[in-house]
């Protein structure tokens, strides 16, 4: 189980264009921000139950993923706590079934984080391709603003790295 206060979990499939937005967002965080040691950045890919090790009732979690929100492509949505599982039942990607199972097992084993926020980006294309569409790529800075604001609300110091 995670010993960190906050876990930021990037999810997605990097082989399906915008489906990989959670991983691209996580890499953006790693490249452009510095965090206190209590923040753990996790590349969850399309993993399912393997991610249970990062769950703990003492931590808070931010999940980053592609999500169907009935928004224009690149739109950003937010789902919290128990509403996440209900939202995932409307399957929008290959790994959501594994994520639903993961959250269900976390509930059964009492390791659900005290707070979970899922920030999702409305995909434009789920076709084969290792880069997100330009629309979704342009949404990353706005997504980072949401993540940054949430971390600050949780009392986490967020430092943007200086440009070289």
Image (cartoon, helix red, strand yellow):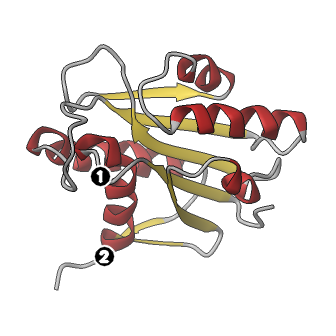
Q: Is residue 143 left or right of residue 139?
A: right
Q: Nearer the viewer, residue 14 or 36?
A: 14
Residue 18, image x, y percentages: 26, 41
Residue 83: quarter of image:
top right
Residue 95, image x, y percentages: 50, 39
Q: Helix, strand, or loop for circle 2? A: loop
Reading the chain from its start, which is encountered first: label 1 or label 2? Answer: 1
**Which residue reaches farthest left?**
134
Q: Is residue 115 left or right of residue 30?
A: right
Q: Residue at x 52, y 44 (%)?
A: 63
Q: Is residue 118 left or right of residue 92?
A: right
Q: Helix, strand, or loop for circle 1? A: loop
Q: Badges 1 and 2: C-beta atoms under 8 Å apart? A: no
Q: Nearer the viewer, residue 25 or 150?
A: 25
Question: What residue would you read off at disc 1?
Answer: 15
Disc 1 packing (10 Å; few <14; some 14–19; many ≥20):
some
Q: Residue at x 56, y 73 (%)?
A: 36
Q: Nearer the viewer, residue 11 or 78?
A: 11
Q: How far apart are the two marked residues, 1 and 2, measured between alpha carbons? A: 28 Å
| Vertical relation: 120 (above or below) 134 | above
Question: What residue would you read off at disc 2?
Answer: 161
| Vertical relation: 49 (above or below) 41 | above
| Vertical relation: 85 (above or below) 18 | above
Residue 16, image x, y percentages: 28, 45
Residue 64, image x, y percentages: 45, 45
Q: Residue at x 19, y 41 (%)?
A: 136
Observer-side mark, 1 or 2, equals: 1
């Amino acid at each position: 189980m995670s010993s960190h206060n906050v876990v930021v979990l990037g999810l997605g499939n990097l082989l399906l264009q915008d489906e990989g937005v959670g991983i691209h967002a996580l890499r953006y965080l790693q490249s452009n921000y510095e965090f206190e040691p209590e923040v753990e950045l996790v590349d969850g890919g399309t993993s399912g139950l393997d991610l249970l090790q990062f769950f703990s009732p003492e931590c808070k979690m931010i999940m980053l993923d592609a999500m169907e929100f009935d928004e224009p492509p690149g739109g950003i949505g937010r789902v919290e706590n128990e509403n996440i599982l209900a939202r995932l039942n409307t399957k929008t990607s290959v790994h959501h079934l594994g994520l639903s199972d993961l959250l269900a097992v976390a509930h059964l084993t009492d390791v659900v984080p005290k707070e979970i926020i899922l920030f999702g980006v409305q995909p434009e294309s789920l076709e084969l391709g290792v880069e997100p569409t330009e629309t979704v790529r342009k949404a990353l800075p706005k997504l980072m603003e949401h993540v940054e604001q949430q971390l600050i609300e949780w009392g986490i110091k967020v430092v943007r790295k200086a440009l070289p």
